[in-house]
Image (cartoon, rainbow, N blue to C red):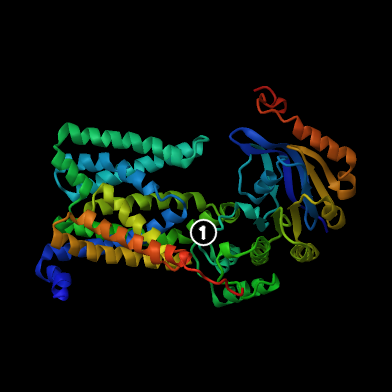
Amino acid sequence: MTATLLTLTDLTLGYDRHPAVHHVSGRIERGSMTAMVGPNGAGKSTLLKGMAGAMAPLSGTLARAPDTRIAYLPQSAALDRSFPISLFDLVAAGLWHRTGAFGGLSHKDRLAVHEAFERVGLQGFERRTLDALSGGQLQRALFARLILQDADLILLDEPLAAIDTKTSADLLAMIKTWHAQGRTIIAVLHDMQIVRDHFPRSLLLARECVAHGTTEDVLTQTNLGRARQMIEAFDEEAHICAQEGVS
Amino acid sequence: MIFDALIGPFLEFEFMRRALVGCIALSLAAGPVGTFLMLRRMSLFGDAMAHAILPGAALGYLAFGLSLSAMTIGGLATGLLVVLLAGLVTRATTMREDASIAGFYLISLAIGVSIVSLKGSNVDLLRVLFGSILALDDPAMLLLAAMSTGTLLVLALIFRPLVMECVDPAFLRSVSRTGGPAHLVFLALVVTTLVSGFNALGTLLSVGMMMLPAIAARFWAVELTGIIFVATLIGLVSSLCGLILSFHTGLPSGPAIILVAGALYLLSLCFGRQGGLILKLLPQRHLEA
């Protein structure tokens, strides 16, 4: 059974009237696994943030199926790693849907956190602080947090950036397991080979949607070339967008 | 002999006992708040806000004399106003928070100094700036204790969102809308703590009671709870030793307390276990793992 999980209608997201990505329409089916690709500055992270509900649209709408639980993995560079909390506390934040902002962790919750550490191969790292971790270890910990979030829709911003091959393979296997469990995956990725080998669907962005469909159809030389040209045509002194119409 | 010098003043004089209790109340709130300020790279924010509360405090002083309640309420009002205006400007424009705060606190400081110099004498200004812990009356004590208790309770309430807002704000926004409000409430707590502090230490030095113990604590503890605990402890020790120093040397109590906190900071800087200078200079063999 396929049903629509996310519906984007003429969605524009940006900062201070400047759109990072504009007039995107499309649907994400439940249980699909989509790679979001495009040049730097294409608006991939912004669109993912919008889908995560971490950013309000400038215009257009983004509708989620009711009761959709979302897990969002920000780029690990966005974390303040000098802040002195333990890895346990960072991972346990994945139980936010149970604890809320104020609730405590039950014995069962603590067991679940320890189990998540084991699943990502970080047992024994619970008391480490964030500055004492390698990039790969931090990413594993953030995946442990995703496990605890137990979400229907998993949004991953560059989940495989700057990590070694072993970690990359482990994390990719985890993403595929989630997909096999029927969860919906959307991941921002730069490695086209990984996208071609593992992601059935792709969404090519260049500040607007260039193509969206099966990876084979989307990642053609023509589409990729077009995406690059559209980014190069970006104008800092832009006038009011013509698609906004006359008001 | 030493016992007499350390405990004697408190046994003998009620005003010293009151001063100690007031300082303890202040330290309990200032340690945790200062720790968060330091970790959010806002160590100088306290200094800016200490200036921002001056006009309200000065107006309270001019209207009601040396009434700590009036000065507190006045200081609180201008401090919160500056935080709120700066917060609104940060959200509504592309201006960053530190720049907005700088803009508003400077206006506030200029107004404060103008009020004091138009209406009062220099002695009055010194009183506002350097506090009067040795003259704490009952209402002032109760106010100080209530503000410290309230600060700790509210900080406990916003603790989890505040921590996550510091570490991983994008993740927090995806699971909860509490990040923004938690930040604003935290800034209000900073103002509250500063205002409680200037009763005891004056506007210029109250910020020292927040920042020095927190910065010193970073040299001893690794994790957030540990840092908060050590910072509070350093605040308490500074209060006790500072009051004794003030009693025996005739220094004003505020500067004396801050001098002790400053000395503890310098000691921590040299001898601290976490990145202290001495440990760094000693030749050490690296660990196995």
- From the viewer's side, name the closer residue of A5 and B111: B111
Q: Quadrant of the N terminus of chain B?
A: bottom left
Instruction: Give x and y (percent) for residue A202.
Output: 82, 48
Few, some or many residues within 10 Å of mark 1 (<14, 14–19, 20+): many
Q: Secondary structure at mark 1?
A: loop
Q: Is residue B221 above or below residue B63?
A: below
Rendering coords of residue B61 (x, y %)? 18, 43
**Side of B11 relative to A72 (left or right):** left
The image quadrant that residue A38 belongs to is top right
Residue A67 visible in the displayed image? no
- x then y, percent, for residue B66: 15, 47
Q: Which residue is mark 1?
A: A83
Up-down relation of residue B126 to residue B92 (above or below): below
Q: Residue at x 75, y 29 (%)?
A: A233
Image coords of residue A13 (percent x, y)? 66, 39
Image quadrant for the C terminus of chain B?
bottom right
In the image, residue B109 sits, relative to residue B164, either above or below, namely: above
Q: Residue at x 86, y 44 (%)?
A: A218
Question: Residue shown at 14%/62% (left/top)?
Answer: B247
